[in-house]
């Protein structure tokens, strides 16, 4: 997804309040050359939009992940989580560009603190 940098901080905080995480691709530590990856994906998205997203050519490429609230063990992310995300994205329609659908990276195993 492409996000207008002018609203990125507010966008991230707003999504965090709904237990979504925003990851700017250019700074993802699991990739050797994350800035290059972000450039390539952004360029691909802009080109595939056939001019509709030209305003977003310099916007920040982000991935959004679902937080703990949305997880149910090894079960897939529920539709209610996707609906909540799409509803929130609609609030930012003029500041984001994305292709509606399901996709992304496989779930990563993250160590959890025991309380």
Image: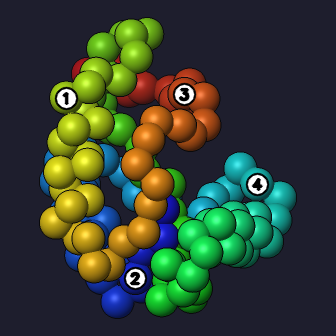
Quadrant of the image occupied by residue 73: top left
Relative to residue 42, is residue 93 drawn left or right?
left
Tag on residue 105?
Answer: none
Q: Earlier in the sequence, mark 1 or mark 3?
A: 1
Q: Residue at x 18, y 42 (%)?
A: 84
Relative to residue 37, is residue 18 drawn left or right?
left
Q: Earlier in the sequence, mark 4 or mark 1?
A: 4
Relative to residue 41, is residue 87 drawn left or right?
left
Badge 1 vs badge 2, beta-carbon distance below 8 Å? no
Tag on residue 107?
Answer: 3
Badge 1 vs badge 3, beta-carbon distance below 8 Å? no
Tag on residue 4?
Answer: 2
Tag on residue 31?
Answer: 4
Q: Which residue is mark 1?
A: 80
Q: Earlier in the sequence, mark 2 or mark 4?
A: 2
Task: Give the distance between the C-alpha atoms of the residues marked 4 and 1, in whole angstroms.
Answer: 30 Å
Instruction: For residue 15, say whether it is visible.
Output: yes
Q: Nearer the viewer, residue 27 or 110?
A: 27
Which of label 2 and label 4 is nearer to you? 2
Task: Give the distance between the C-alpha atoms of the residues marked 1 and 2, in whole angstroms.
Answer: 26 Å
Q: Secondary structure at mark 3?
A: loop
Q: Quadrant of the C terminus?
A: top left
Quadrant of the image occupied by residue 88: bottom left
60 lies above or below 28: below
Task: Give the distance between the C-alpha atoms of the residues marked 4 and 3, in whole angstroms.
Answer: 16 Å
Q: Position of residue 34 (x, y in %)?
A: 73, 65
Q: Nearer the viewer, residue 80 or 75?
A: 80
């Amino acid at each position: 997804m492409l996000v207008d940098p002018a609203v990125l901080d507010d966008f991230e905080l707003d999504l965090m309040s709904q237990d979504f995480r925003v990851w700017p691709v250019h700074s993802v530590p699991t990739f050797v050359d994350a800035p290059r990856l972000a450039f390539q994906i952004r360029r691909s998205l802009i080109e595939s939009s056939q001019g509709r997203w030209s305003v977003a050519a310099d916007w920040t490429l982000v991935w959004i992940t679902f937080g703990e609230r949305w997880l149910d063990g090894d079960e897939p992310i529920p539709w209610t989580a996707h609906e909540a995300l799409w509803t929130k994205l609609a609030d930012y329609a003029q500041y984001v560009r994305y292709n509606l659908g399901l996709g992304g990276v496989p779930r990563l195993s993250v160590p959890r603190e025991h309380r």
